Image: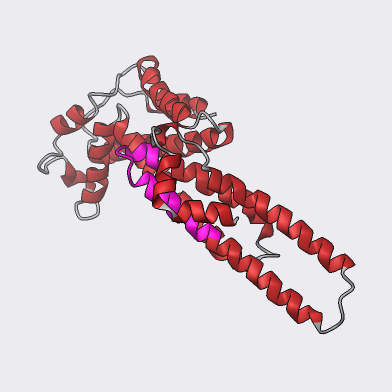
Amino acid sequence: MANYMSLIENPKLHMNLFQGKSVKGIWILQYFLKLPRIVEHVELLSQQAEEVANLPQFSEEVYSLSSNLIEDAYCKYSEKIFQALEDLVASEMKACHADRLRIENYEFYCSSIGSYQMSLPHLSKYFDIASKRKEAAKQRYVALTLEWSAFAGTFEFLYRLENLRKDIPPYDICYQYRFTPNDLLSAISCIPKDVQAIQPLALAVRSRIQKHFKNDPILFMQMLKEVFKVIRANFESLAGNVNECYKAHTTALPWEDIEKMLRELST
């Protein structure tokens, strides 16, 4: 652990480790890979020492102190590897790659350290930090993926419409600036009227997620479901808002077929 700690704390060594690599080409950092192995090894040795040492009664305090020092070292190491990850992604220009790396590393930390939360309560703080940062990165990744998708313009109109409806009744929406029936038709013009023509647009989103999470099939399926869950919710909301706010106008979009197609692509 000391060797890795010194590597993390030395900026020059840290940068040399990733020299010539972009965040796009990096997966799980070796700092993160090393921690569960260290914890497993040390905890096994501690358990063996506790069982066979046959220490006198007063030595329990010594053993407790030793355990606390070991756990404090785990916590310090966790803090350092989190900072090393954040320093690395801060240099990445594309936010999708930065958040992809955050998701992968914080997910690895949570899955590999989670079983030690009861025996090492001090690590719970860092487990919570990793969980929150992972979820925040997931939310940003979903938002960025939708902004990249062919549906971005339609969803942007939907978000503005949902916000406007907080103050304006549905029967007055179509008379508002930038929300006329023509504005609606312009906003949904990027969506083909045939579901077979919409499918390639959705497949492009799926392929992008698969490319980003090619190293982890489980995370790929998780992110695929999360992204498509929001896409389906947006189409459902759009259909409902159009039905309520633009009753005199038809969009000719096959809402039910779109929902079915999106559901199939997210499995």
Q: Most extreme residue toward the bottom, as rendered? A: 58
Closest to the observer, 172 or 43: 43
Tell me what residue is drawn at x 61 percent, y 51 percent.
35
- Residue 181 position within the rendered picture, expressed as x and y whole percent measured from the top left: 16, 32
Closest to the observer, 181 or 73: 73
Q: Is residue 34 above or below residue 203?
A: below
- The answer to which image quadrant residue 73 occupies is bottom right
Residue 89 visible in the shown view? yes
Q: Is residue 82 magenta?
A: yes
What secondary structure characterizes most of the magenta part? Answer: helix
Q: Most extreme residue toward the left, as rendered? A: 177
Tell me what residue is drawn at x 38 percent, y 34 percent.
22
Q: Is residue 85 magenta?
A: yes
Tell me what residue is drawn at x 24 percent, y 50 percent.
163
Closest to the observer, 214 or 61: 61
Q: Residues in magenta?
A: 77-98
Tell me what residue is drawn at x 25 percent, y 24 percent.
190
Quarter of the picture holding the C terminus? top right
Quarter of the picture holding the N terminus? bottom right
Residue 82 visible in the shown view? no
